[in-house]
Image (tube, rainbow, N blue to C red):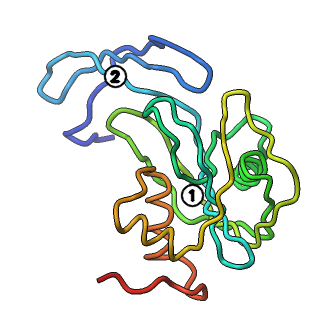
Amino acid sequence: MPTDPLAWETLDRRIAYTCPGFDIVNESVQLPDGTETEFDYLSESASVCVLPFTPDGDVVCIEEWRQAVDRVNYGLPVGGVEPDDDDLEAAARRELAEETGHEADRLESLVTVEPANGVADTVLHVFVADGCRPTAEQRLDHNESIRVAPTPFDDLFEAIRDGDVRDGRMVLAVSYYQLFGDDDRDAPAECS
């Protein structure tokens, strides 16, 4: 079977570092020109991101401390798929409930992306959740500091358009939804 002339050949692979949530993989590779070198990347399980809408059309956003950037991040419920999850939708429902205390009437797949495939094998599955209502208390992991921040979609879209939102997963989910999402939902004003 012919391979793409751009393909690298993996000669050896090892886990250089492991911790809860991800591994750092070190590979010995041969480049197309025959050069042998090392390549390191972050490896983690697939994750889900939920764009949750209340019956009134607000987005159930979260504010969460992010140690890597030393600030509170304004984002969406996101988390890894766990072995007990029956499927991606179950993972999305679990993350929504754990991080926000909300449950959705309906979930629909929006898009699947590789958000950082130059340095990670991460796959992110984005879902739209409709009819989200608070049904319980948050069930946060021991290392999560999160508060729920419902936001009107128009305000959220404007904040993204103005560059006030830095979380890439939120920017992707909201922007993709604005471009290709539900035509029945009231859309924000036209961009100027």
Q: Is residue 94 above or below residue 185?
A: above
Q: Is residue 71 above or below residue 138?
A: above
Residue at 31% across, 15% down: 28
In depth, the one of 63 and 23 nearer the eye is: 63
For badge 2, the amino acid type reads Thr
Quadrant for the N terminus in the image: top left
> Looking at the picture, how far across and down is residue 140, in whole percent?
75, 38
> Looking at the picture, how far across and down is residue 99, in whole percent?
72, 47
Give SS at disc 2.
Answer: strand
Residue at 81% across, 60% down: 103
Mark 1 burial class by Cα count in 10 Å: few <14, some 14-19, many 20+: many
Which mark lies nearer to you, 2 or 1?
A: 1
The residue indicated by pointer 2 is 10
In depth, the one of 45 and 34 nearer the eye is: 45
Horizontal side of residue 147 vs 16, given as left or right: right
Mark 2 burial class by Cα count in 10 Å: few <14, some 14-19, many 20+: some
Quadrant for the C terminus in the image: bottom left
Which comes before the other along the chain, label 2 or label 1?
A: 2
Residue 126 — which label?
1
Q: Is residue 17 above or below residue 79?
A: above
The CA distance from mark 2 to mark 1 is 30 Å
Give SS at disc 1.
Answer: strand
Residue 57 — which label?
none
Q: Are marks 2 and 1 in contact (CB under 8 Å)?
A: no
Q: Is residue 72 above or below residue 40?
A: below
Horizontal side of residue 43 vs 127, given as left or right: left
Picture quarter containing residue 143?
top right
Residue at 34% across, 81% down: 191
For badge 1, the amino acid type reads Val
> Looking at the picture, how far across and down is residue 95, in whole percent?
72, 47
> Looking at the picture, how far across and down is residue 134, in whole percent?
82, 61
In depth, the one of 135 and 27 nearer the eye is: 135
